[in-house]
Image: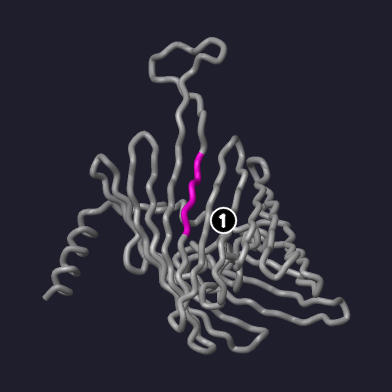
Amino acid sequence: MRFFTTCLLFAFAAANAYKVVGANNSLEAVQGAKSAAVGGAALALDSDLPSLVHNPLQLSNIVKSSIAFTHVAYFEGTSYNGVVMALPLIGAGTLGFAASRFGAGDIPYIKENDPLPEGESYNTLSISDWLLTSAWGRSFGKLNLALSMHLLKRELDQSGWGFRSDIAAGYEFSKRFVLAGIVKGWAASSVRWESGHFEYSNPEFYAAFKFSEPFPYFYGKLNAYWQSAGVSEDWLSASSAGLEFETDFSFSLRAGLAEVNNTNGLALGAGIKPTSWLSADYAFQMHQVLSSVHRISVTASF
């Protein structure tokens, strides 16, 4: 009876909602520098803790408590700052938590019918998206499973609250080839504004793979990453892809495309792991209209 009532309430909410493309859209912004450097193919990576929002599967591989920080400098003073923690549970997988802010401040504006201000005597406003994520992942041999839940608060001229839940699975066919998939918004993807306006997005499926080829004569290995766009979109031509050369000297070089059919989205990056418990990553990404984007991430385990 409880299950039937829940389904009935959800059906009523969906019938009275206004479907949009873009509800909870800030959840799609690439966060970790490592993922960004390979074109945003985050789901294909087995380790990029700052991108927990996009890839909860990586929790299945974490055996030590870890913390990560990331900073992204966008155009016109817009920035993203986030912190992520991973806490392994004995025999029960790993929990992950993330908190972040994406926004900009000191944006000048003029109220309607007001005269143009003189000098610097203008009004300013700020916009921001606050994101909280909790996730769980566990390995079952070659099969990895993960679940994540996201809470979003958007502050514009009015505030809105959003929610989305994702479920993901990955299978390791060999040490060289891994296939993964994620359903974003499988339980819900919705936003509700202070005015009472309600928006929702349909569930969306994404696929990804990682292929590794050792190059012992060059003292490293080459990793190829690919992630599709949503299956309801142009999932192949709008997919993301990247390459990473991982040296035996704890240093990596990366390059990728946010969309394989658009070279204007080229990304480049590098990573370094000076000790067994510390790593740092950097990514530079071109933008076809606005200025380039810079990302820095640092991860520590203990």
Q: Is residue 17 left or right of residue 261?
A: left
Residue at 68 percent across and 66 percent down: it is 242
Q: Residue at x 74, y 60 (%)?
A: 270
Q: Is residue 53 left or right of residue 200?
A: right
Q: Which of the 4 image quadrants contains residue 292?
A: top right
Q: Residue, x 43% and y 68% (percent of image)?
A: 135
Number of marks in the rendered image = 1
Q: Farthest residue toward the front?
A: 302
Residue located beneath label 1 in the image: 31
Picture coordinates of residue 181, whole percent (x, y): 49, 75
Q: Nearer the viewer, residue 234 or 207?
A: 207
Q: Is residue 168 visible?
A: no
Amino acid at dot 1: Gln
User: Position of 141 compared to 296: left or right?
Assistant: left
Does 101 appear in magenta?
yes
Q: Is residue 119 magenta?
A: no
Where residue 170 appears, as percent x and y from the top left, is: 51, 80
Residue 116 visible, this angle: yes
The residue sitting at 80% across, 76% down in the picture is 220
Q: On the rendered image, what quadrant is the N terminus found in?
A: bottom left
Q: In this picture, is 238 found above or below 100?
A: below
In the image, residue 77 above or below residue 14: above
Assign a secondary structure to mark 1. loop
Quadrant of res 272: bottom right
Q: Which residues are magenta?
A: 98-103
